[in-house]
Amino acid sequence: MTILLVTTPQGREGDAILELEWALERVRVRGTDWRGVLLAETPLSRGEAIDRLRNFETQAIQRVVPLDLVVPARREEIERAVLEVARKIDGTFAVRAKVRGNRGLSQRELEVKLGSLIVEAFGLKVNLSDPDYTVAVEVLGKKAGIGLVGRGELLRFEVKG
């Protein structure tokens, strides 16, 4: 099962859901408490889902972040999950966090702390400008999605709002 966090301009969620259904065919999309943020689950492999979306002409999808784990949005749970996915890194990395609806967590603090943990645990090198891997942390209120995203797996599209 592949989990994708998908962003779209506010008010275009319905269009993005239709595009996800057309591109992926077998997909379940749920809205979140945040306008413009959707969660999609598909039985397709991660590579297949990313390839289909990369080659799809979208009018509503802005960003697609593949997630490996969804955990409670507590610092210790996020740290454990990040260390679990970081085991697979073979190259440079960067941590990118986006926090929505959780005042107890700071994006900047998460990025610095999690990056330090990975360096201490695995001795890996940080590269903020062009990493081989990005550890994506997407906090949505009480849940956090963690994804180890290889170069080219994070999709960004130019969408007119």
Image (tube, rainbow, N blue to C red):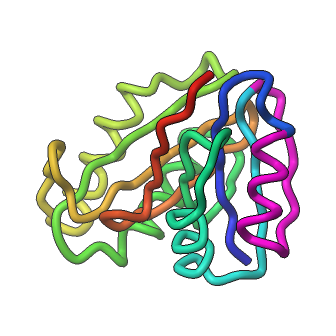
Name the foreground residue: 47 vs 157.
157
Observer-nearest of 46 and 67: 46
Query: In which quarter of the view is residue 90 placed?
Result: bottom left
In the rendered view, would you say 13 is above or below 151? Answer: above
Side of 8 where 96 appears, left or right: left
Span highlighted in magenta in the image: 15-35
- Residue in view at x 46 percent, y 58 percent: 82
Q: For this rendering, which residue is in front, 56 or 142?
A: 56
Number of disc labels: 0
Question: Considering the image in quadrants, where does the N terminus appear?
Answer: bottom right
Task: Estimate the x, y position of residue 64 in percent, counting from the top left.
Answer: 56, 51
Examine the rendered structure and indicate whether residue 56 appears above or below residue 47. Answer: above
Q: In the image, residue 138 lies at what x, y percent?
A: 57, 42
Image height of 160 relative to 152, above or below: above
Horizontal side, residue 125 vs residue 42: left or right = left
Q: Within the image, what quadrant is residue 34 found in?
A: top right
Residue 36: % across, % down: 72, 30
Query: Which residue is pictured at 36% across the width and 78% down the height?
Result: 88
* Residue 116 coordinates in the image, percent (x, y): 24, 46
- At x 36%, y 25%, the residue is 108
Quadrant of residue 135 within the rendered picture: bottom left
In this picture, residue 45 sits left or right of residue 148: right
Quarter occupied by the C terminus? top right
Residue 32 forms part of the magenta stretch: yes
Q: Nearer the viewer, residue 90 or 42?
A: 42
Residue at x-position 55% and y-position 33%? 159
